Image (cartoon, rainbow, N blue to C red):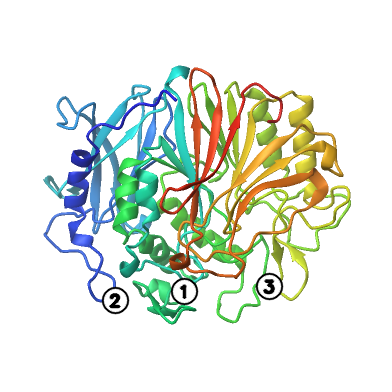
């Protein structure tokens, strides 16, 4: 693969680490650190970039008080001949967060940036700059692309453990120098309180950093915001954010487990029973804490296309906001499905217009793995597959329509990436094995969790003929990160040949499985 080196990372990050020194992990468990009040705005939560393309990107920051966001960019770490971008005024209405869009950037180049926070009443008074870097996508095919994906952070009560080193998986991911990181959802567990300690099966104790907002399920806007801030207490994640752009999607745990629109909760932990109310608050906090290009649109949608040059388009799905209610999912007609009619129309149009060699469909839920929802005591279905080995039913009907469309429009190079199920696996879908046959073969790769409980492998549904070519999963449920089974995936696209290589990796970066795909094939 012809992949550009990542120059001067240590010196690039030095400023970011210095600026975040006021927000180090506490030595005493049980309380979150406070900002050091210097009289000038502080950016102790680090910086992030997101939805980077050939000529644009978004820069995010959070202040500890009202401030004007200013971004400076340069081709060098010295910031000589820096270009200045005037960002928004950060205030309480956005929890002092803000995003600045950078346009007209050079393609395929390393961009160094620093964020300054200025006193809105005296612009000369600025806090310590926080620095970061990212690469814009290359307009030249020969440069190649490397990106990573995973999901599920701080789930099932497994939070930031200083004894464990915190979220160490981000160090292994950063060492691979990816062009970007695709987070496939469950960026937080708003429904998962974090306690100070958890007893492990071997008699040892897992110890968590805790905060007030993580002591209960999130219901208020302040509590949802606190869930996003919790993860930014981890220095590993903040370092990663400063050097690797993200493409973020969401799933259920940004709101509550297995939610769907219109649901009324029976969970006694909640005083607010309307999922629609909770989802509205969660979406606001989500939009404040991630740099996502479409969230400021009038429709505020999460689903979008991120173009990454001639080699790659990423189609980010939202399988949560527009779905029908979870049920036994065995209906013979289903116009709404898991995507909703409008999102399905959008996806078909975007796929048919794409001229990229590879078309990654970023799905927050798997297609052929059975994911049950038994929260109300009924045998309901949470994802797409419902376990019936026959012809498609329920939400499978919508996916069948999409797969048929890909075949008959002769759309090449589609690959499905997902997380959600807390193990890693590779499934190959083949019409000759399937109950529904009007589609071309394709691959689906599963990774995660990043730092959450690990679970046994899910059952397969035969509607689209999946064969599980590889899987690594525990036999017990909710295995802690100390027990292993934390995963991320890597995708390398070689510029000259167009080959796409998928590697499924463990927490420390060890490669578990490799699959090489050839370009130019309908489906894949």
Counting from the top left corner in percent of width and height, residue 492 is at 49, 32
Q: Earlier in the sequence, mark 1 or mark 3?
A: 1
Who is closer to the viewer here, 64 or 318? 318
**Element class at badge 2:** loop
Q: Residues within 10 Å of mark 2 (few under 14, many from 20)?
A: some
Q: Earlier in the sequence, mark 2 or mark 3?
A: 2
Calculate the distance from the C-alpha at mark 2 to the C-alpha at mark 1. 15 Å
Q: Quadrant of residue 255?
A: bottom right
The correct choice, above or below, for 185 with respect to 256 in the image is above
Q: Earlier in the sequence, mark 2 or mark 1?
A: 2
Residue ID for mark 1: 193
Quadrant including the N terminus: top left
Q: Is residue 71 visible?
A: no
Calculate the distance from the C-alpha at mark 2 to the C-alpha at mark 3. 33 Å
Task: Identify the mark at residue 11; answer none if there is no mark.
Answer: none
Residue ID for mark 2: 29
Calculate the distance from the C-alpha at mark 1 to the C-alpha at mark 3. 18 Å
Is label 2 or label 1 in front? Answer: 2
**Element class at badge 3:** loop
Who is closer to the viewer here, 36 or 188? 188
Q: Quadrant of residue 45?
A: bottom left
Counting from the top left corner in percent of width and height, residue 109 is at 32, 25
Q: State the residue at coordinates (66%, 35%).
A: 346
In the rendered view, does 133 fall on the left or right side of 56? left
Counting from the top left corner in percent of width and height, residue 274 is at 61, 69
């Amino acid at each position: 693969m012809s992949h550009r080196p990542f120059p001067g990372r240590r010196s690039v990050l030095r400023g970011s680490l210095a600026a975040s020194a006021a927000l180090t992990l506490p030595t005493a468990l049980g309380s979150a650190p406070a900002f050091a009040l210097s009289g000038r705005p502080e950016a102790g939560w680090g910086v992030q970039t997101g939805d980077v393309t050939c000529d644009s990107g978004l820069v995010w920051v959070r202040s500890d008080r009202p401030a004007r966001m200013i971004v400076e960019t340069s081709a060098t770490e010295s910031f000589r001949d820096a270009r200045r971008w005037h960002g928004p005024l950060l205030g309480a209405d956005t929890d002092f967060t803000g995003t600045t869009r950078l346009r007209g950037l050079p393609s395929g180049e390393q961009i160094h940036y620093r964020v300054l926070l200025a006193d809105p009443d005296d612009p000369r008074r600025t806090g310590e700059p926080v620095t970061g870097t990212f690469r814009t996508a290359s307009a030249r095919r020969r440069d190649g692309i490397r990106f990573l994906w995973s999901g599920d952070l701080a789930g099932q009560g497994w939070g930031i453990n200083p004894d464990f080193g915190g979220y160490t998986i981000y160090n292994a991911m950063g060492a691979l120098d990816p062009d970007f990181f695709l987070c496939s959802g469950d960026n937080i567990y708003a429904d998962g309180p974090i306690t100070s300690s958890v007893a492990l099966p071997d008699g040892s104790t897992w110890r968590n950093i805790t905060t007030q907002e993580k002591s209960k399920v999130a219901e208020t806007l302040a509590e949802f915001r606190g869930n996003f801030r919790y993860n930014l207490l981890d220095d590993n994640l903040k370092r990663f954010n400063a050097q690797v752009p993200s493409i973020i999607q969401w799933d259920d745990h940004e709101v509550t487990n297995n939610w769907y629109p219109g649901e009324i909760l029976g969970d006694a932990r909640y005083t607010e029973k309307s999922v629609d109310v909770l989802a509205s608050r969660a979406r606001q906090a989500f939009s404040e804490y991630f740099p996502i290009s479409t969230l400021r649109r009038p429709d505020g949608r999460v689903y979008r296309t991120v173009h990454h040059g001639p080699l790659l388009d990423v189609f980010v799905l939202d399988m949560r906001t527009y779905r029908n209610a979870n049920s036994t999912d065995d209906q013979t007609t289903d116009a709404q499905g898991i995507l909703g009619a409008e999102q399905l129309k959008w996806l078909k149009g975007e796929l048919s217009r794409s001229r990229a060699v590879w078309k990654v469909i970023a799905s927050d839920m798997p297609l052929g793995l059975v994911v049950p929802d038994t929260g109300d005591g009924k045998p309901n279905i949470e994802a797409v597959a419902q376990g019936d080995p026959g012809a498609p039913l329920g939400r499978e009907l919508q996916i069948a329509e999409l797969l048929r469309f890909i075949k008959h429009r002769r759309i090449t190079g589609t690959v499905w990436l997902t997380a959600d199920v807390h193990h890693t696996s590779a499934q190959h879908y083949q019409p000759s094995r399937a109950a529904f046959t009007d589609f071309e073969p394709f691959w689906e790769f599963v990774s995660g969790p990043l730092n959450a409980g690990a679970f046994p492998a899910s059952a397969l549904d035969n509607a689209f003929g999946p064969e599980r070519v590889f899987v690594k999963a525990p036999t017990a449920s909710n295995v802690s990160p100390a027990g292993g089974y934390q995963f991320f995936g890597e995708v390398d696209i070689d510029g000259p040949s167009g080959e796409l290589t998928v590697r499924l990796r463990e927490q420390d970066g060890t490669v578990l499985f490799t699959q090489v795909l050839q370009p130019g094939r309908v489906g894949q």
